[in-house]
Image (tube, rainbow, N blue to C red):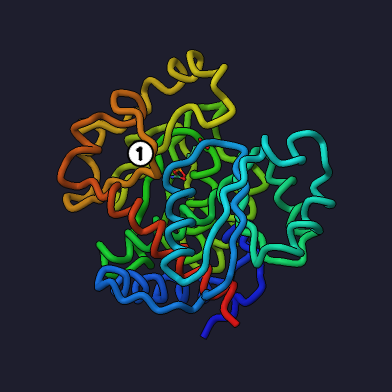
Amino acid sequence: DINLKSRDLLTLAHLEKDEILGLLDKAIIRKEKTLKKQFDQPLKGKILGMIFDKSSTRTRVSFEVGMIQLGGSALYLNGKDLQLGRGESLSDTAQVLSQYLDAIMIRTFSHKSVEELAYHADIPVINGLTDLDHPCQALADLMTIYEKKGKLEGLKLAYIGDGNNVAHSLMIACTKVGIDISLACPSGYFPDSQITSLCENFAEKSGAKLVLTTSPTEAVAQADAIYTDVWTSMGQEEENEKRKKDFQNFQVNAELLTSAKEDYLFLHCLPAHRGEEVAAEVIDGKHSVVFEQAGNRLHAQKALLVEILKD
Ligand code: CP
Ligand code: NVA
């Protein structure tokens, strides 16, 4: 059995393969219970604080609903309204919030800030997205692929687009569990080199293949799952016009997908921009699992919260 009690989740890189697989099993059991409306209360009385410095639909609602369904509760804390927004230090904030809460989920820009918060907090900290990583997303992504394909090891995933936070968390997740991953990015938009070398080590251990290319066609060939994300992430809005030009040959559309496996899955973390990173025919087509994927955020995070916070 896995033991994540009182641990932070800043990145899946900190989890062992068996811990990731164990969480997925628990997420699938949680999902069955939730769909049957069987709500036990393993987190009765526990309170999660959720700090947001960026917008959110899925992360905010799924964490809050998850805590309520588990018998606990959650507080939405807008970073701008906290004293943090007026310059109170992360260290002081962490020590104060540790007196009131049982865990903190934070969505912000700098990954270093989340590490600093976690270092100073006496309670577990969960990364709800930074500029570098989005581990809770990757858990739901793996869960979705596992449900649809009945396995993970030996599959091939193609990620087309920006080498961003979502690309990083997918790379980590796939190379940890043994999914071959090919990422096609325009030059200048490749994943972070430190994360890439970390993933090369994970790949060596799991037997996964990790390929970086500038050719979407090469990446998609014989892929079981195709994934894309927005070209302009939160915080990069002023680069939007430049990015639209730089990414114009990186749209996931029906033509690109002709070389994927016949039964490919299409995934996207959402929010999506139809006509930019993905054509409507793909995201609204029969291979798309994006809404089940979004739904799985709830189940995967509930499993995670129970493991971290249970008595
Ligand atoms: N995928 C995801 O994290 O969505 P939100 O930005 O809506 O939370
Ligand atoms: N890469 C996107 C993901 C949003 C869930 C962003 O950071 O804005």
Is residue 174 visible in the rendered image? The answer is no
Look at the picture and state if 245 lies above or below 4: above
Give, as a three-letter code, the residue at label 1. Answer: Glu
Please tell me which residue is depicted at 74% across the width and 57% down the height of the picture. Answer: 97
Which secondary structure lies at badge 1? helix
Is residue 237 visible in the rendered image? The answer is yes
Residue 214 point in image, percent of width and height: 45, 32
- Find residue 110 and report its image quarter: top right
Please tell me which residue is depicted at 66% across the width and 60% down the height of the picture. Answer: 125
Q: Is mark 1 within 8 Å of ligand 2?
A: no
Q: Nearer the viewer, residue 5 or 1?
A: 5
**Extreme residue toward the bottom, this view:** 1
Look at the picture and state if 101 lies above or below 117: below
Q: With 286 as the anchor, is 296 left or right in this view?
A: right
The residue wearing badge 1 is: 218
Q: Quadrant of the C terminus?
A: bottom right
Please tell me which residue is depicted at 65% across the width and 67% down the height of the picture. Answer: 102
Please tell me which residue is depicted at 54% across the width and 31% down the height of the picture. Answer: 234
Q: How many marks?
A: 1
Mark 1 residue crowding within 10 angstroms, few (<14) / some (14–19) / many (20+): some
Residue 230 point in image, percent of width and height: 43, 32
Q: With 36 as the anchor, is 4 left or right in this view?
A: right
Q: Quadrant of ligand 1?
A: top left
Residue 239 point in image, percent of width and height: 55, 18
Residue 185 point in image, percent of width and height: 47, 33
